[in-house]
Image (cartoon, helix red, strand yellow):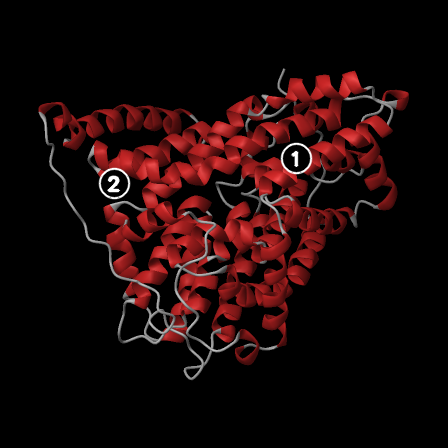
Amino acid sequence: MAAVSEVASRGPSQPPSHPPSHPPADEREGMLARLGLRFTNWAEHWFPDAYVFVCLALAVVAVAALINGATPAAVAASFGDGFWSLIVFTMQMVMVVVSGYVVATSPPAAKLIDALAGVPRSGRGAVPFVAAVSMLSSLLNWGMSLVFSGLLVRALARRTDLKMDYRAAGAAAYLGLGATWALGLSSSAAQLQANAASLPKPLLAITGVIPFTETIFLWQSMVIAAVLIVVSMAIALWSAPSAKQTLTAQAMDISIEAPVSQVHKPERPGEWLEYSPLITLIVVALGGGWLVREFATKDAILAISNLNTYNLLFLMLGALLHWRPRNFLNAVAKAVPATTGVLIQFPLYGGVATILTTAKGAGGHTVADQISHAFVALTTHSTFPVAMGIYSAVLGFFIPSGGGKWIIEAPYVMQAANDLKVHLGWAVQVYNTAEALPNLINPFWMLPLLGVLGLRARDIVGFTCLQLIAHLPIVLFLLWLLAGTLTYMPPVVPG
């Protein structure tokens, strides 16, 4: 689509070219929004790339292992042994991004976006509507949610009868990543724990396989998701600027023209099949046949919890929606740049996790053993969910990677959960719920959406900061309250 093509050529990390045609932020926003803007300004100036964070994490863990008594040779061996331990999971997460992007940018999705853009009756009402679409779609696929919601905001901004604040709507489009994505089907931690083949062996021995029925499909998890959706929509509505203070996309000098659909024709005989749906139908028929058999022979929840099944389902849907192979391939090519961080960072996360769990020092204990013992010493069965939630949220701001960060945390927090007899599936959901909180103010995850919208992080973070302030106490309270409704079960390790 035109907006996404513009982003691909410009690069998501470069600021948009539109000049600020609105008054200074401090004159527009209240105290909380100003605080969020100042924080993001600081982050934009001083925060390095996420790759630097994982390298720093690797250095810290390696030094910790040496201080713990491990030899340099043992630390190096653990790093090398673990470097490729996540190769399967890395590719699976890449496909989550690609498949979500492909579905969100398909022609039928564009028609759906136009239809949804006709629903709101007021500019202010459009903001919570976008929030609802973003959060609900993120439960299916977080990559799709970002692109789809961003394109919906652009479609709404084209409506001349609506005076919608473009910044508030952009912030609402981001709420899928800031509130609910980790509670849905594309949760990297839940997906990883449900697939024995994707888990590093040391972690598998600690946690066993935890199916979706014990993580995202727990009724307690669904309660948290429902509460966050309602609260987020309410804040999105109440924080939307009044008509006098509304800044539209036109007022911000942002181009929101609808993309022009172009149907190309083959220029030579060898390209005929690229533009024929015949190849698509053959591939989709084969993939669809396998999916039908998979869901017919297995429990539906068990089937969808397999990352390979999940990704194949979305890829086949994307191929079918794009119809022609050339259109499908073009969409895949535009999605690939968004996977760079996953491809280069996850092998390092694998090395970090293996050092944590296998580089033994004094008394035969690893760094993960020492941290888990500290968790057990400082918390109890009832306080563990809150302590883990705070820890995961704080760490999530410095290591902005859901699946990669879980690989680092899981060995010691899950061992502590075992020791304290905390429900292991709930421990995963504690992580998932808390993991999303720092996303609300961390510019890293905003980049793809900001590229689609043509905004800067500072344009939306004042609104998302308000969401964080409201979410934090609610999330911590629910994590503590609902933990008491669950009973510990020992890990189930495949034979």
Q: Quadrant of the C terminus?
A: top right
Q: At x 74% / y 40%, what residue is drawn?
A: 422
| The one of 381 and 101 positioned closer to us in this rendering | 101
Location of residue 372 (image quadrant): top right
Please state which amino acid type lies under the numbered disc 1: Cys
- Crowd rating for badge 2 (residues with CA inside 10 Å; few <14, some 14–19, many 20+): many
Q: Position of residue 317 (x, y in %)?
A: 30, 37
| The one of 191 and 339 positioned closer to us in this rendering | 339
* Left or right: residue 423 compared with residue 420: left
| The one of 292 and 244 positioned closer to us in this rendering | 244
Numbered mark located on residue 403 in the image = none
Which is more foreground, mark 1 or mark 2? 1
SS for dot 2: helix
Q: Is residue 212 above or below residue 204?
A: below
Q: At x 49% / y 65%, what residue is drawn?
A: 459
Q: Position of residue 368 (x, y in %)?
A: 78, 31
- Crowd rating for badge 1 (residues with CA inside 10 Å; few <14, some 14–19, many 20+): some
- Judging by the rendered image, the residue that carries numbered circle 2 is 321
Spatial separation of the CA atoms under disc 1 and disc 2: 39 Å
- Judging by the rendered image, the residue that carries numbered circle 1 is 55
Q: At x 57% / y 24%, what residue is drawn?
A: 196
